[in-house]
Image: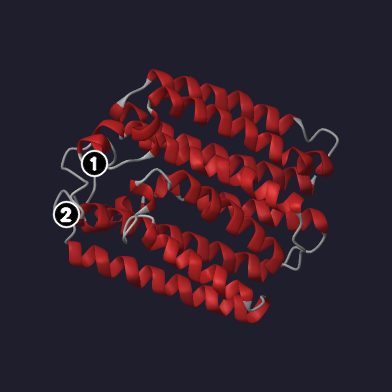
Amino acid sequence: MSTLRVWIEAMRLRTLPVSLAGILFAGALGLLAGHFRPAPWLMCLVFALLAQIASNFANEYYDYKGGLDRAGREGPRRGVTEGDITPEAMKRATYVTLGVACMVGVALVALYGEWWMYIAGILTALGVVAYSSGPYPLSHHGFGEVAVVAFFGIVPVCLTYILMGGMFGWWLLAMSVGVGLMGANVLVVNNYRDRDDDKSVGKRTLAVRLGLRAMSSLYLADGFMAVILTMPVWLAAARWGWICPCVYLVLHFMLYTRLVRGRGRALNPLLGMTAILMLLYALALWVTVLL
């Protein structure tokens, strides 16, 4: 396997729509409210993508260091575990990528934000590492899905909207939680697929704690709750705006049926499909607002 392909695989491209969707959703909200600003929006997009790539690198490195990965696992190939990437190289890549993301974040807040946003940026950077490492790794103790709601829903949607000139409101928080729940479903699929592998190495993910039936029910509920929380913006955008959320729910239910029927490697495509559906939901809001 070529070096470039190994690193691209380590980035886990199929999960990156989760970062894109939150920023896209916030951009559509700004467009609807009449204060969309391209420069801060694009900087938020770059920051979000770099932060997620750094998180993916960190997850691979720290899971390897903690002995939580094994060769031939059910999920996508792990370059460090399989010997394609040295641990030192992955560690460097993690902190270089995170460092670049932090530089973008500092410039973003300096140009368009307020002082308290530096705190949010620091917490986000810490979250990238704390997800897989530290004294209490969130992903190892059943809090991974909660972290996704926070860092791929609440933080990107709210901060991007505010950095473009919008004002915080409870409606904005509700929207951001809805987006976060869609993102959490990507991790639900991941942990559902890896339950046996994780349990064998002592990794206490939510799937290990609750079991497969509860996780599949959570997947279904997350999608419906996400639509309930975000429906107001669709109805504000157009009288026919309810159509797109309904289409989302139909597709979401179809993915749910694949989840409950699949096991192991057969679920790998479902992870990407869940992320793409989330991205399409955000893109559809853009189209609805523009029309």
Give me the disc on residue 285.
none
Residue 35 shown left or right of residue 110 in the figure: right
Report, in whole angstroms, how far the alpha carbon at label 2 lies from the one at label 1. 25 Å
Q: What residue is rendered at 33% in x and 70% in y?
A: 95
Residue 14 shown left or right of residue 169 in the figure: left
Which residue is at the front of the view, 69 or 17?
69
Q: Is residue 205 above or below residue 99?
A: above
Q: Local crowd at mark 1 within 10 Å, few (<14), some, or many (≥20)?
A: few
Q: Secondary structure at mark 2?
A: loop
Q: Secondary structure at mark 1?
A: loop
Q: Position of residue 157 (x, y in %)?
A: 64, 56
Q: Which residue is mark 2?
A: 84
**Snapshot quadrant of residue 114:** bottom right
Judged from this view, the residue extending furthest toward the right is 239
Q: Which residue is mark 1?
A: 202
Q: Position of residue 96 (x, y in %)?
A: 34, 72
* Total numbered labels: 2
Q: Is residue 76 above or below residue 196?
A: below
